[in-house]
Image (tube, rainbow, N blue to C red):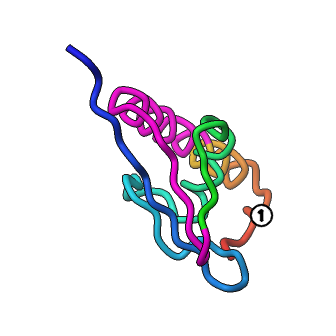
Amino acid sequence: MSDQNVIIHVRFAPNAAVVEIGERPANLTPQDWFFFLSDKAGNAYQALSGGRGVFRLTRSQVDALKVDALKVDALKVDALKVDALKGESAPSAA
């Protein structure tokens, strides 16, 4: 059985911030999900006109990336907890 193709659409604001992106895990911002996909699957990205772009991946690739994104996010949260326990100030969320 062949793997289903998935197209993840991205929309950008005029200042290049990500406004909307498909298949985003609920715990990541649109910008964080775009950075994560760009890092892990940048070769699957195609820029389009009008402040848009797409990632062309298979369903299994998207599912694996979502699992990895949850792990990375959990590690970030754990690092913030450790810093808080040490009495260090956590970076503010912008």
Q: Residue furthest front?
A: 49
Q: Is residue 58 magenta?
A: yes
Q: Position of residue 47 (x, y in %)?
A: 63, 58
Quarter residue 48 falls in: bottom right
In-front residue for pair 62/2:
2
The answer to whether 26 appears left or right of 78 in the picture is left
Looking at the image, which is closer to me, 16 or 46?
46
Lateral position of residue 90 relative to residue 55, left or right: right
Residue at image position (46%, 63%) is: 21
Residue numbers of the magenta segment: 49-75
Instruction: Name the residue carrying label 1.
Output: 89
Left-right relation of 43 to 2:
right
The amino acid type of the residue labelled 1 equals Ser
Total numbered badges shown on the rendered structure: 1
Q: Residues within 10 Å of mark 1 (few under 14, many from 20)?
A: few
Image quarter of the N terminus: top left
In reply to whether residue 48 is colored magenta, the answer given is no
What percent of the width, then of the height, locates residue 7?
40, 48
